[in-house]
Image (cartoon, rainbow, N blue to C red):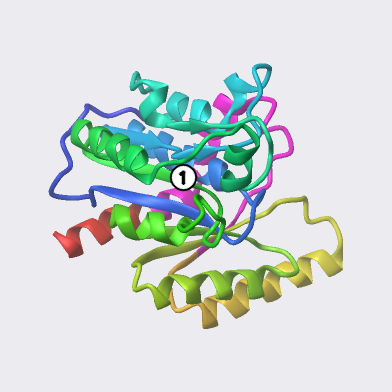
Amino acid sequence: MRRAKTKSHQSSPRGVFITATDTGVGKTLVAAALVAHLRQRGIDVGVMKPVETGVTPSTKAQSDGARLREAAGSHDPMAEVCPYVFRCPVAPLSAARAEGKTIRVATILHAFRALRRKHDLLIVEGAGGVHVPITGTLDGLDLMERMGLPVIVVGRSDLGGVNHALLTLTALRQRKIPIVALVLNRVRPVRTTIARTQEQSTSVLLGRLAKVPVIGPLPYHSGVTRTWPDGILQLAWTVEIMALAKLVSAYGREKL
């Protein structure tokens, strides 16, 4: 499936920011699969996770930043890929304060610009949802706005997914941040009739109310965290991720 590496300035946006309706809904899964797909299509893609929390010495190799870097086959320094890493699994502002540190947006943007100069396309994964505080005065929306990237929103496909997704989309629209797509992810297996009904309801309602392309639900793979590289490569060539990659490319052509 791998193709010769090509330059893509004329067919793709310079980057995309991946956010979520909540924490733990699959941002890294979607981001890594999209990165792997684009890479196998021969696109020079860079990755960034500006701030990551909940990383200890024993989990460093499985961190979001490390997994994105692996998916991209990147040799960029981790200081650029993930400028701020903290141990405590809380919001970035709280995690930084727990270690007596200060997150500086200027440091994040410096790394962002350095990565953007190196690659045709940059995939940036945020921390948590759009209103998660990054500093004492800035949240995720502020960071997206300063980066000037269009956004992919990842949300849950089960009960509660409609409200969370619509609130997130509304927040982005209020700041006039462009939205590429809403991706629905299965965070747990769908095993009962009620669960299937709830998922169908979420998908149908968001397809009508989101007013952006809605992709998914993505297939659920219980072992993907245990067999990460192989699982991501399989997900990268699913219908859903291929459709997402086409939307990213189409958005780029429209905006250039």
Residue with the most extreme bottom position: 209
Decide: is 81 above or below 14. above
Secondary structure under tag 1 reads strand
47 in relation to 74, above or below: below
Q: Residue at x 71, y 51 (%)?
A: 187
Q: Residue at coordinates 34% horizontally, 18% vertically from top-left?
A: 75
Answer left or right for 96 relative to 24.
left
* Residue that badge 1 annotates: 125
Residue 64 in view in this figure: yes
Residue at the spot 43% in from the left edge and 63% down from the top edge: 181
Q: Quadrant of the N terminus?
A: top left
Q: Is residue 222 above or below residue 189?
A: above
Q: Position of residue 159 (x, y in %)?
A: 75, 68
Q: Quadrant of the C terminus?
A: bottom left
Three-letter amino acid code at the position of disc 1 = Glu
Question: Looking at the rendering, which quadrant does residue 193 occupy?
Answer: bottom right
Where is residue 26 drawn, in percent x and y?
Answer: 61, 47
Residue range in magenta is 215-244
Callout 1 environment at 10 Å: few (<14), some (14 to 19), or many (20+)?
A: many
Q: Residue 46: percent from the left, percent from the top?
A: 32, 34
Give left or right: position of 183 versus 58: left
Determine if the magenta segment contains residue 219.
yes
Q: Residue at x 38, y 35 (%)?
A: 47
Where residue 80 sits: x, y (%)?
36, 29
Q: Is residue 87 magenta?
A: no
On the question of residue 150 being in view, the answer is no
Quadrant of the rendered structure where residue 117 is?
top left
> How many discs appear?
1
